[in-house]
Image: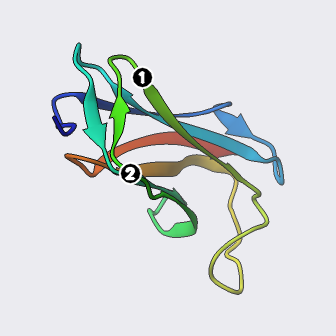
Amino acid sequence: MDCTATQIEVAATTDKRSYLPCEQVMFASTLRNRSSTTCFYAGYEFRAIYADPAGRAIIGFDLISPGTRSPLAPGAVLTGSVPFDQRACNAQPCQTLIPGPGYSVTATWTFQGGPYRAAATFALG
């Protein structure tokens, strides 16, 4: 049986709540089969987007795991993690990151029965 939304749980965390200027932000997201039955999936895409307090994207990352039909056992977890160097950005010139709360990173898993999203917030200072 293919994985369904009722079987999947997504979480997102950063390793700290606040980061010093130019300190690397570490982000991780998990996709877990929370059900008691094995489900199947055929690859996935993991995308992480870091945003400023106004919700403007600073930088994004994609990981694509194409594959054949694979099982996801009960309690099994897929993990995606993406470090963020505060000096990096997708758009040039890079925007200046202002110290304060409200920065976020959102994970989107394009996976059987999804997409699924989870976010974490952090402060720069």
Residue 119, percent from left and from top:
43, 43
112 sits left or right of 55 in the view: left
Q: Residue at x 38, y 28 (%)?
A: 32
Residue 98, percent from left and from top:
68, 60
Nearer-the-camera pick, 57 or 97: 57
Question: Which residue position is annotated with label 2?
Answer: 68
Q: Is residue 125 visible?
A: no
Q: Name the amino acid type tagged 1.
A: Ala
88 sits left or right of 102 in the view: right
Q: Residue furthest top?
A: 36
Task: Give the position of the N terminus as an image quadrant.
Answer: top left
Image position of 40 with respect to 110: above or below: above
Q: Residue at x 69, y 86 (%)?
A: 92
10 Å neighbourhood of mark 1: few (<14), some, or many (≥20)? some
Of mark 1 and mark 2, the one earlier in the sequence is 2
Q: Residue 76 has which mark?
A: 1
Q: Residue furthest bottom?
A: 92
